Amino acid sequence: MVSRVVIGFLLCALAVSRAILAEEQPTAAGALPDPELTIAAAIDQQIGERLALAGFPPAPLATDLNLLRRIMLDLAGRIPTAREAREYGESNAPDKRRALIERLLESPEFVAHQVNVLDAFLMQSRRSNLRNYLELAVAENRSWDRMFREMIVGESGDDEQSGAIQFLRSRIGDIDRLTNDVSVLFFGVNISCAQCHDHPLVHDWTQDHFFGMKSFFHRCFENGGFVGEREYGELEYKTVAGESRKTGLMFLSGKQLPETEVSEPSEEQRKQEKAHLEELKKQKRPPPAASYSRRARLVEAGLESENASYFARAIVNRTWQRLIGRGLVSPVDQLHSGNPASHPELLDWLARDLIHHGYDLRRLIGGIVSSDTYARSGKWDSASRPPAELHAVAIMRPLLPQQYASSLALAAFDPEPLNSPDASKKIEARLQFGRGFADWFELPGDEFQVGSEESLLLSNSDRAARELFGDGGDTLVARLRSCADLSSAAELAAWNVFNRPLADSERQLLVEYLEQRKDRLPEGYRQMVWAMMTSAECRFNY
Amino acid sequence: MTLIRSISRRRFLATGTLGTAAALTTRGVEQLLAAEAQRQDKRVILLWLAGGASQLETWDPKPGRPTGGPFQAISTNVPGIQISELMPRMSRHLQHTAIIRSLNTKDGDHGGASRLMHLGRRDEPSVKFPDLGAIIARELGRSDSQVPDYVSFYTATEGRGTSLGQSGFLGARYNAMSLTQEQIPANLRRLEQISEMDHRARGQLRDAISEQFMRGRESSAAGSQREAYQRVPGLMASEKLFDPSSEPLSMRELYGETLFGQQTLVARRLVEAGVPFVKVSRAWWDSHGQNFETHLELVSELDQVLDALLTDLQQRGLLQRTLVITLSEFGRTPAINASLGRDHFATVWSCSLSGCGILGGSVYGKSDEDGNDVAEGPVGAGQLFATIFQALGIDHRKEYALGARPVPLTNPGSEPIKAVLA
């Protein structure tokens, strides 16, 4: 089945393949910035150098209020309240941004949001069984390498297999998918193509790479819903030419892992094993842990110094993509030599820094959001907009379902009660209420598009009208009705929904709209609030 | 993880040797072709016969054979083509229809087979493929369209789980507007608390403040959000399309006063208004027992509905640009079991294609004497899909880029069946 398509690719691949093969490990020593720099300084140095080379001055820094909203969404998963916005805007403290970041990184809201982010990333769902584990691990700020180990091998003492191992357990029915998911999520490489043939485009990835990785998992099995692992069994696969081939354990780097040979069990032993497993199934107990585990070998191999850069670069790249809007390597599952990073030295520096600081994700996140690169304005008013990968200007990012839901829930309600001393409890209650809306929205992938399901729902659903755009007791609309005039009502709504004052042109637009509805003002307010909450500004992190 | 881009852009990035102009030219040509396909306003109505309709009681009768069952074959208006006597009305429409009698799709499990016949290929663990409707919606839908791109009726509960639409990596923009219990899609109707004028006005206010905000900013996702809201009034106006009661009684009676008949009438209303893809599902054809009673009832209904649809489309001048497909997840065994039923059978079975791009009066492929095996011209799901795309003027080799991976509309090696194409 050598099709036109594959041939097309080979031609393409030829053009690049020669140049690729050398680059594997972090680039030449000496090219990386000083290890003693702060993360933010290293980022700004590297991004700045490329920009200077390209001849683009960066956009100015975003306004304080813009930046507050951006940081709150990224670290706490919600927009600021009107009060938080006013206070931040009015503060003259020279290091208020740093203080904000430090405070948020220590907050329970950071934990809750980071759990949402990791859960979406690892499980692609909002209600997975991994959440309990993630809540614990993120609250303790467990290191990423430890979390990796726990998700692949399991936590000691977790006999019920209810913790981290849910990552593996939920995928145990499909070892091919498990193999590719682990490669994508932890190492940033999508080797699914190499399952059937050597990767047509990427020289790094052959069938051996796929089956070498699969060998780490193919002894795993499911027994009564639990994960077990055998201590014998070799993986064979058919090449495109139809030959049978064994790879043995091979890491993505191509490194073979030697093992002592094990003999296949006898018929009798197999029978016994089967009977034992049946018994365990009846007792609803997991199979005993293997004394030699290939999964454990993967963790070991993935984290040893010569391979660790794969693991570290993958999570650095993901984190960068989440906070900046585009991976240093893009797409994020194509970390290979044919797809170089926009800033290779920066990626390598960040990966090295992460390793040196014990895979501390909180530190990495804090470092990125402290940089000027993160803080650029998203507006570019002159003619030629620089390419996104230069990071001269901030990239707009669609909100995650929970971010949008939380933000809507805060925007929809009266800001007044949040001036009380127990504001944080009230905020929490509103966020809790908002969680119910998260199911309305799609988890954004790359090149995300909003569908008409969303616009129809927010336009016409009875529930949205009642719960988000109502005018009862504690709603924003109820508060607007007590405002002295239309202009101050519009202003208050802007603080609550957009967390900023209105520009003159906006005020004019809104007041005009309200004036035309003076005979039915509550409705006018509802419509204005609806228009703001469904606007591009409310839907994106900008 | 998913990333859809024009393939030419991916190639441009991959090689780094193409000039920008060259890459843009390729992309431009692609866009021109796509625009051309859209301009022609082609449409699809898929009649999905869920559970597995019997080929022997429809398109490939075997009268007089041990496997033939009690029904006879009848001649049609195309000399040499015979179909089951359960389809007397359809026998007058064969000049617009191609029959494929040699589907061999290998999967006899409802779930897997249903996915296969919706996606045109096997599910893959790491890729969520779009189904036929989503691809057609993307290829033939227009971004400024005032009507839905993809509507799917599936009222029965049997088999619904594996037959719902899947836009896969194309994203929510191409999700089916899906109707299960309801006959009118959710959230199309304006709430009473807001007047029609205010509803529109607040939408314009939304657009105006978003537009101010977007000055100096760039985001295709924000562009899609703007489109999603701008489509709201049009989508709401399409609500009336879902109501068959505004059709004359004679028209409703032509389609038959059954749910399937009325939904198919709605499908015609939708394609007439510009909806590129409508699927109407009729369940449940899974006749493990009493196959002949079941088919007497269901095929007779199908016969009336097909006759009505083809006649109606023809009279409105829509048949040349509307492709009507009848398809199941598989066919049924030639062997008749002890309960006088027929079981799941994917080795040799049939489907029909009528209208747009189809060579009428053609039959492709043959089953053997008793219908146990393909005797001539085996057809897989990929080939069928390639044929459907080709009939609509869509290049089945067109590729979506999923990250660095190119995903052609049909799997490589799936070539259209030229013999049934006009």
Image (cartoon, rainbow, N blue to C red):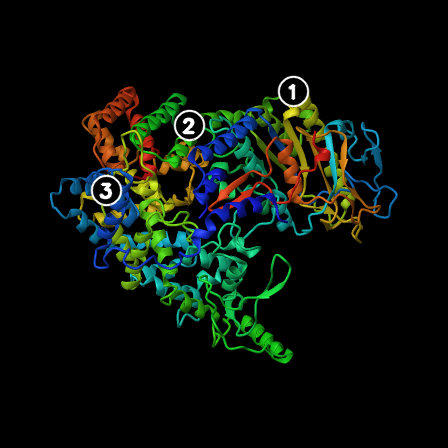
Q: Residue at x 46, y 34 (%)?
A: B22
The number of numbered discs placed on residues in the rendered structure image is 3
Give x and y (percent) for residue A519. 29, 20
Q: Nearer the viewer, mark 3 or mark 2?
A: 3
Report the residue that reaches farthest toward the right.
B64
Q: Which residue is mark 1?
A: B316
Q: Earlier in the sequence, mark 1 or mark 2?
A: 2
The numbered dot on residue A209 is none
Q: Residues within 10 Å of mark 3 (few under 14, many from 20)?
A: many
Q: Is residue B191 above or below residue A442?
A: above
Local secondary structure at mark 2: helix
Q: Residue at x 38, y 43 (%)?
A: A437
- The amino acid marked with disc number 3 is Leu
Q: In the rendered view, does A97 fall on the left or right side of B296?
A: left
Q: Which residue is mark 2?
A: B230
Q: Are marks 3 and 2 in contact (CB under 8 Å)?
A: no
Give A457 or B211, whichever is nearer the viewer: B211
Q: Is residue A502 above or below residue B333?
A: above
Give x and y (percent) for residue A231. 52, 74
Q: Residues within 10 Å of mark 1 (few under 14, many from 20)?
A: few
Q: Are marks 1 and 2 in contact (CB under 8 Å)?
A: no
Q: Nearer the viewer, mark 3 or mark 1?
A: 3
